[in-house]
Amino acid sequence: MKNIIVAIILFAMALIADPAKITIAELNTKAETIVDQEITFIGVAEHVCAHGGQKLYATDGTNKFKITPSKEIGAFNSNMSGEKFTFVGFVREFKLDNDYLDKWEAELDAAGAKKAEEDTPKNCEYDKNSTSKDEKHADNSVYKQIADLREQIKNTEKGYLSYFSVECTSFTKE
């Protein structure tokens, strides 16, 4: 009985200590089925975001995948670009739905209203209100992007769009 318990404990420790190894190609096809699971994969840091190192795109030469740093890592360093690493982390899913888009659009509207208020002379209330919301949005590519995303959501069975990434908890240079 003791041997069975020890074997179970050793097996569980092996699972915890050695996250599932996967390729970037498999990650791209299986991400939806392994959300919140810890994985290990090898890739070349193709791009590190210059805006604080909060995104890194790893590639196997053909496929690529987005990686974000965990709180423990904090940020990726731009000198990682072009280097090969083993990454360990958890697959995460971001669900973009109409509620998210509503909040985004409201933020844009609020920012636009504030800018219009700053740009309009204080004594001219008519000018602030003379353009309809649709006219204000007509030439704004962000509003077009939101409209395009709403159309994509409408065409899904899930009612949202999924974007997958790996939250990296550790990495080592190969």
Image (spheres, rainbow, N blue to C red):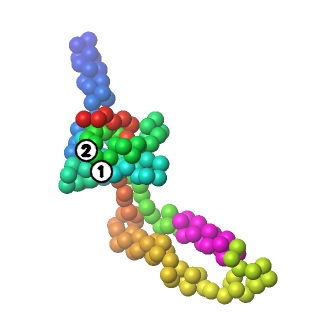
Give neighbour class at mark 2: few <14, some 14-19, many 20+ (Cα, 10 Å): many
Instruction: Give the residue displayed 60% in from the left and 85% down from the top.
Output: 132
Instruction: Give the residue displayed 41% in from the left and 74% down from the top.
Output: 148
Q: Is residue 16 left or right of residue 94?
A: left
Q: Is residue 35 magenta?
A: no
Specify the amino acid type for callout 2. Answer: Gly
Magenta range: 103-117
Does the rendering let one see residue 76?
yes
In the displayed orientation, state which residue is furthest to the top.
2
Disc 2 to disc 1: CB gap under 8 Å: yes
Image: 113 above or below 42: below
Where does residue 80 sit, x and y in percent of width and height? 34, 43
Residue at mark 2: 43
Where does residue 94 sit, x and y in percent of width and height? 41, 55
Total numbered labels: 2
Q: Nearer the viewer, residue 145 or 139?
A: 139
Numbered badge on residue 46: 1
Instruction: Give the residue displayed 80% in from the left and 82% down from the top.
Output: 123
